[in-house]
Image: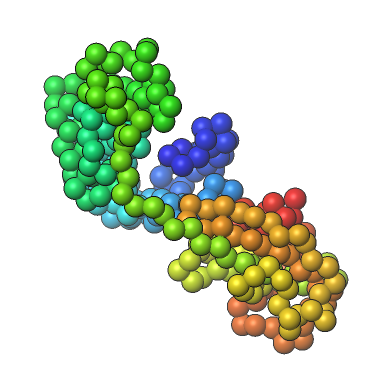
Amino acid sequence: MQQTRIEQGTAYYLKFITAYPTIFDLACASEQDVLNNWQGLGYYSRARNLHFTAKHIVNELNGEFPSTYAEIIKLKGIGSYTAAAIASFAFDECRAVVDGNVYRFLSRLFDVGTPIDSTQGKKEFQLLADSLIENAKPALHNQAMMEMGSLICAPKPSCEICPVNLHCIALKNKTVEDRPVKSKKTKVRDRYFHYIIYVSNKKTIITQRTEKDIWQKLYQFPLIESTHSNAPTHLEDIIESSSEPIKHILSHQHIYAVFHRVHEIPKKLNADWLIIDRDCIQDYPLPRIIDRYLK
């Protein structure tokens, strides 16, 4: 839910807890099943970490989820924000959560110019958040802080109805639009994917992404990555048809994918290629861009 709209994520959440009603069910599931149930959400490393941590809790902690921030943060895939959220909401521990909404609210309320994406900024805002929660009810306070940033102190703020506008230093100094400050600009790179779809006798070929890259452990058609959207020259003679480039936007990358249909399966197969029934492809976890093409 941190990176996905609630209305989109809710269906996945309900499907996930139906498939895995307890941590034991999740631990016993195969990674492929977990990725299948996650398919379409993106951020697949989170699914793999969730699965790994479920197995760790079942096998090493007797199925008991840790109840303190200090222990929760040791779990794979859980950072300071998630650990603070779990500790405060589930176990009433006095730990302040600092997400994008809280960064924005605090940077305006106290008119802090330290970049929120710097090491110093992260420490400064965490200390500030910790100082405010000291005498509060942790869950209620954290919920209020996140809602302030989400509903009132949004990117386009509603200062006139803000319940703390009399205390807002950025409003007084007329620097609301300048907060929060970010120091780094993310470089976005373009990538050009050419998927080769072999089709013969209702069979096709897929392969699993195993390298440390996007969509790790998901399945795809054989892929050739190039520097442009034109078909690889050595395949031009066997390509029957090609799709228009399909654009897929990730946080740091823009993927341009072209799907090329080839009406024959080569006699010599790569070692990592898997021949499957064409109708069974949805049994495998697929990147969203391939799922879109198939539909």
**Residue 218 point in image, percent of width and height:** 56, 62
Q: What's the image's color scheme?
A: rainbow
**Residue 284 point in image, percent of width and height:** 63, 59
Q: Is residue 45 visible?
A: yes
Total label count? 0
**Snapshot quadrant of residue 89:** top left
Residue at position x 43%, y 39% in the image: 2
Q: Between 92 and 123, which is closer to the camera in this rendering?
A: 123
Residue at position x 41%, y 30% in the image: 155
Q: Establish if 223 lies above or below 278.
A: below
Q: Between 254 and 267, which is closer to the camera in this rendering?
A: 254
Residue at position x 56%, y 31% in the image: 7
Q: Establish if 269 lies above or below 223.
A: below
**Residue 3 point in image, percent of width and height:** 46, 42
Q: Is 35 left or right of 136, judged from the image as shown?
A: right
**Snapshot quadrant of residue 106:** top left
From this viewpoint, which residue is outermost toward the front?
174
Q: Is 194 left or right of 104, judged from the image as shown?
A: right
**Residue 97 point in image, percent of width and height:** 27, 35
**Snapshot quadrant of residue 149:** top left
Q: Between 22 and 145, which is closer to the camera in this rendering?
A: 145
Residue at position x 28%, y 16% in the image: 165
Q: Is residue 67 visible?
A: no
Q: Is 143 left or right of 50, judged from the image as shown?
A: left
Q: Establish if 197 lies above or below 188.
A: below
